[in-house]
Amino acid sequence: MTTLYTISNITFTYDATSHSKINALSGLSLSINHGDRIAILGLSGSGKSTFLKMLGGLLPPSSGYIYYNSTPLFTPPADVSLLLQNYGLFPWKTVEENLILPLLLKKIAYDEDLILYWLKALGLEDKRKVYPKNLSGGQMQRLSLARALLKNADVYIFDEATSSIDNESEEIILEVLKRLKKDKTIIFISHRLKSTMIADKIYLLDGGSLKEEGDFDALLRQKGFFYQMYTEQAELENYAGGEVGSCKI
């Protein structure tokens, strides 16, 4: 497989106060290939979202470099679709209009059959004429995902695509991500570790640096930080009546 992203020794520093600076990322190096399904994990404050924005071309590194398709990355690539945590929906437009309007604004022709396909795939077919205020959090996240998928990008980057949603919505979203063509690259961040079962590779960040990497089973076998996080989450969800390991993807 050919390399899509080459990330070499990047740091990102921001001003915490007028007198101090903090490194959100520090000396991070890794690579991502075309067609990979990549999960980025880490505790709160580990630099996940900062790193995602850098891959989307929204933030430049303070030092080091990022190459996208062998070219230095300075601006958002046209073939990358980035879905951030905030939904960014138009509250005064229906579900269907929320899908069409972004395409019209960018003067992109839209295919009604494709719109109906993603609405059905994401369980929103009967919500076409509904306004976002009448949707659940999970349904709004699914609508945001449908809008991103309509761009038909080569690379999809999702920040917390399965966070703060119901189990049904999570299962639907993961099934849709699995359904994407193998030539599509998917990079996603999630606190729900069972979501990472669909990943070809997991990168686990800690303090802005790469702590562990590997696929789901390999990281469990290592019995390191990922194993500890997974075990703690399993205990919490099983105590609450759920099963972290029930999603066999």
Image: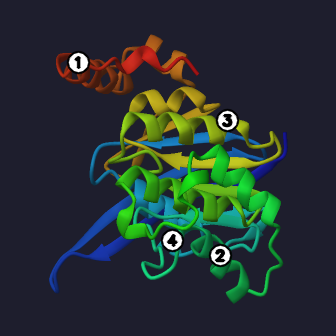
For image coordinates 67% across by 35% down, the residue present is 178
Q: Mark 2 near mark 4, Cβ–Cβ under 8 Å?
A: no
SS of the residue at dot 2? loop
Q: Which residue is mark 4?
A: 61
Work out whether 170 lies above or below 221. below
Classify mark 3: helix, strand or loop: helix
Which mark's residue is nearer the viewer, 2 or 1? 1
The residue tagged 3 is 178
Mark found first going from the N terminus, 4 or 1: 4
Q: Nearer the viewer, residue 128 or 71?
A: 128
Q: Earlier in the sequence, mark 4 or mark 3?
A: 4
**Is any atom of residue 41 visible in this view?**
yes
> Quadrant of residue 181 in the image?
top right
Q: Are marks 2 and 1 in contact (CB under 8 Å)?
A: no
Secondary structure under the numbered disc 1 in the rendered image: loop
**Mark number displayed over residue 76:** 2
Asked whether the residues under the numbered discs 3 and 1 touch, taking CB atoms below 8 Å apart as contact, a structural biologist would say no
Q: Earlier in the sequence, mark 3 or mark 1?
A: 3
